[in-house]
Image: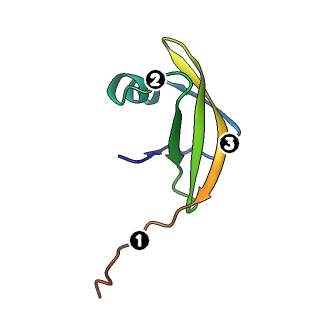
């Protein structure tokens, strides 16, 4: 999976806790200092965040870059 959907994506700083924290660090095994991609469902942009602080219960991410990434089918269906 290239990116993760998160409703708050686009803010300058994010704090992940609970299920979001567990999924990112236990399932996908990201580490402090890595860059990860997040999207929200409101726009066509992909947000790249750097993991700045990683604790047992929460993580702090800081926005590094924004790209326009439109997701659409390669072939027209109808």
- Counting residues from the start of the chain, the first of labels 1 and 3 encountered is 3
Q: Position of residue 78 (x, y in %)?
A: 29, 88
**Disc number lying in front (1 or 3):** 1
Hey, which quadrant is residue 77 in on the image?
bottom left
Q: Secondary structure at mark 3?
A: loop
Q: Position of residue 22 (x, y in %)?
A: 40, 23
- Counting residues from the start of the chain, the first of labels 1 and 2 encountered is 2
The residue tagged 1 is 72
C-alpha separation, residue under disc 1 versus residue under disc 2: 31 Å
Q: Estimate how packed mark 1 is, as few (under 14), some (14 to 19) or many (20 or more) residues with alpha carbons within 10 Å.
A: few
**Disc number lying in front (1 or 2):** 1
Left or right side of 48 for 76: left
Q: Residue at x 53, y 51 (%)?
A: 40
Is 11 located above or below residue 60 in the figure? below
The reply to whether dot 1 and dot 3 touch (C-beta < 8 Å) is no
Q: Residue at x 60, y 57 (%)?
A: 67
Q: Residue at x 36, y 31 (%)?
A: 28
C-alpha separation, residue under disc 1 versus residue under disc 3: 25 Å
The reply to whether dot 1 and dot 2 touch (C-beta < 8 Å) is no
The residue tagged 3 is 11
Residue 8 seen in this snapshot: no
Q: Which mark is residue 18?
A: 2
Q: Secondary structure at mark 1?
A: loop
- Counting residues from the start of the chain, the first of labels 3 and 2 encountered is 3
Q: Estimate how packed mark 3 is, as few (under 14), some (14 to 19) or many (20 or more) residues with alpha carbons within 10 Å.
A: few
Is 21 located above or below residue 4 in the figure? above
Hey, which quadrant is residue 12 in on the image?
top right
Query: Residue placed farthest to the left in the image?
Result: 77
Q: Secondary structure at mark 2?
A: loop
Query: Residue placed farthest to the top in the image?
Result: 56
Query: Residue placed farthest to the right in the image?
Result: 12
Hey, which quadrant is residue 75 in on the image?
bottom left
């Amino acid at each position: 999976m290239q990116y993760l959907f998160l409703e708050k994506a686009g803010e300058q700083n994010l704090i992940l806790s609970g299920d979001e924290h567990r999924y990112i660090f236990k399932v996908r095994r990201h580490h402090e200092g890595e860059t990860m991609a997040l999207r929200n469902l409101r726009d066509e942009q992909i947000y790249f965040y750097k993991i700045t602080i990683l604790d047992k219960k929460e993580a702090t991410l800081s926005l590094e870059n924004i790209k326009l990434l439109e997701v659409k089918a390669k072939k027209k269906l109808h």
